[in-house]
Amino acid sequence: MKISEVTAPKPPTPEQQRIKAMQGQVKRAQDAVKAERERQRITKAQQSLRKALNN
């Protein structure tokens, strides 16, 4: 195969770029929700532990 026979991949269209960006935003938002739920769960557990130790 000659080098001239290898074609470079086409750049994504603006629509494809927009979809990819939105997918990235969704992933980041899902990760943020997951992290916040974990933070709240830990905070609640710490409060329960403090309450149990104080009694």
Image (tube, rainbow, N blue to C red):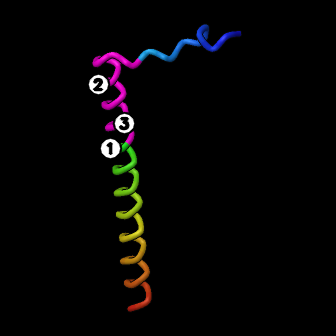
Image location of residue 16, percent across then percent down: 35, 19
Q: Pick whichever of labels 3 and 2 is earlier in the sequence.
A: 2
Identify the residue shown where x is 43% and y is 89%.
53
The one of 2 and 49 positioned closer to us in this rendering: 2
Residue 29 tag number: 1
The one of 40 and 22 positioned closer to us in this rendering: 22
Give the amino acid type for the residue marked by disc 1 in the picture.
Ala
Identify the residue shown where x is 32% and y is 38%.
25
- Are circles 3 and 2 on residues that touch, CB within 8 Å? no
Tell me if mark 2 has few (under 14), some (14-19) or many (20+) residues whose alpha carbon lies within 10 angstroms of its own.
few
Residue with the mark numbered 3: 24
Image location of residue 3, percent across then percent down: 63, 14
- Are circles 2 and 1 on residues that touch, CB within 8 Å? no
Task: Please tell me whether mark 1 or mark 3 is closer to you in this view.
Answer: 3
Start and end of the magenta stretch?
Answer: 11-27
Does the segment drawn in magenta span residue 32?
no
**Where is 43 relative to 31, above or below?**
below
Residue with the mark numbered 2: 18
Identify the residue shown where x is 39% and y is 39%.
27
**Where is 39 relative to 53, above or below?**
above
Q: Is residue 54 left or right of residue 18?
A: right
The one of 24 and 53 positioned closer to us in this rendering: 24
Give the amino acid type for the residue marked by disc 3 in the picture.
Gly
Q: Pick whichever of labels 2 and 1 is earlier in the sequence.
A: 2
